Image (tube, grey):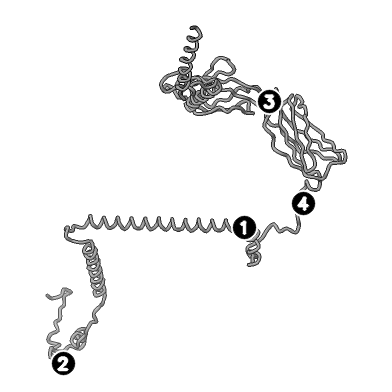
Amino acid sequence: MKKFLIIFTILFLFPLNVFSQEEITVEELVQEQPASSRIEELDKKEEERSQQKANMLGFVLPEYSDNPSYLIVFQDPSSDQKGVEIEIDEKPFEKISSPYSFPALNIGMHNIRFRFEDENGYVQLLEYEFLIIPRPPIINTPEITDTTITVGGTSLPNSEVHFILTSTTTNKKDIVKVDANGNWIASIEFEGGVPKEIFAISAYSRKYGYSSNLSDFVIFASNKESNNLKEDDNVQTSFSFKDLTKGTLKEILHRNKDLILLLCITIVITAISTLSIKGAFNSIKQKKSEKETEDIIKKSSISEEKTLREVFEEKEDKKTVKKEKIEKEKGKEKKKDVKKPKIVNRDMFLKDYKHVDPDTDSGKEIDDKDIKENIKISLTSKKEE
């Protein structure tokens, strides 16, 4: 009986277990994510919040820099301009103003926190991890002998300089200690002599386990003659336009294809500029004529039935009448200036000579007797009236 009950119980519970397993949804499976994915989501959300706070201040601090006195420029998002405070490596908060330069941070990781109020008056904290790394070393011009290449320069005091020397057949690496004054020097020897090749050297500094960026490459040749630039006497370094011919012009354009492109660009720019200037002048001229037309329409007392053509015709008629008046006035002035010739007849000519040879009105001679009778003699000085 007990066996029967056990078997019956197993047979009854088995399908329930299978049914319960089939009822597990995808959402339940997604919720059971591993801890790493949940941490990634939290980190992502934290980065978004940090970015929003950084946008309030108006700058983002980089992950690392080789400048211990890194300069930042920020803004105060608070409505009352209460200011921004900074905390460096758990030191007390201090108020800062923009622009702000960090106080010569040591090489290594630093914890930076900014405290400020947003536009709504809520206090916000923005945290950064700021890494200061060494600056790249400076490499001086190498000195070359028959069997040795000597390289030196400057770097961070009491640090290490890792340099790499490469050429077609050479690839050498070495580590050099930097003295307290920041100077370093290294010698690379070649058993069979320094090959006459072109070398490239670069280096980086390392201190407290932190490395700098790679320095700029210094390229040099082991052949001393190749290090000096010689002037070729056969190369012509000047020209004059009068010496240009069709052949030399073609040769110049063939050797300097960029010159053709430059000429084409210059021509296109000149054409565009000319068209623009011409269009501007035409526009100004058109606006001026339109303005004159508007003034004519406003000043003239024209009924609504008259057209613009009639207005201009009346204007031309007025101009014609005015010209005719001016011509008439000029004609009158000319007439005034012309003198009429004086006509002298016989009587007018002899009038002035009557006292010498007096005649009658009919033209006859007067007798001497008549003349004497008309003469009056007076003894006084007073003339008879």
Classify residue 383 by image quadrant.
bottom left
Point 49% across, 28% down: residue: 58
Kind of residue at badge 3: Tyr
Query: Disc 4 vs disc 1: Cβ atoms closer than 8 Å?
Result: no
Marked residue nearer the N-terminal end (4 or 3): 3
Please tell me which of labels 2 and 1 falls first in the chain: 1
Q: Earlier in the sequence, mark 3 or mark 2?
A: 3
**Pointer 4 local density, CA inside 10 Å: few below 14, some 14–19, many at least 20:** few
Residue named by callout 2: 365
**Mark 4 vs mark 1, CA separation in Å:** 27 Å
In the picture as drawn, the residue positioned furthest to the right comes out as 192
Q: Earlier in the sequence, mark 4 or mark 1?
A: 4
Q: Say which of marks 4 and 2 sits in front.
A: 4
Which is nearer the eye, 147 or 369?
Answer: 147
Q: Any mark on residue 230, and which?
A: 4
Front of the two marks 1 and 3: 3
Verify CB contact (< 8 Å) between mark 3 and mark 2.
Answer: no
In the rendered image, the quadrant that contains the C terminus is bottom left
> Distance between the Cα atoms at labels 4 and 3?
44 Å
Q: Which residue is mark 3?
A: 210
Spot occupied by residue 243 in the image (x, y as percentages of width and height):
65, 65
Q: Residue at x 61, y 26 (%)?
A: 69
> Between residues 250 and 81, which one lies in front from this camera angle?
250
For label 1, the SS is helix
Tell me the number on the disc at residue 257. 1
Badge 2, how many Cα within 10 Å: few under 14, some, many 20+?
few
Q: Position of residue 253 (x, y in %)?
A: 62, 61
Q: Are marks 4 and 2 in contact (CB under 8 Å)?
A: no
Amino acid marked by disc 4 = Lys
Q: Secondary structure at mark 3?
A: strand
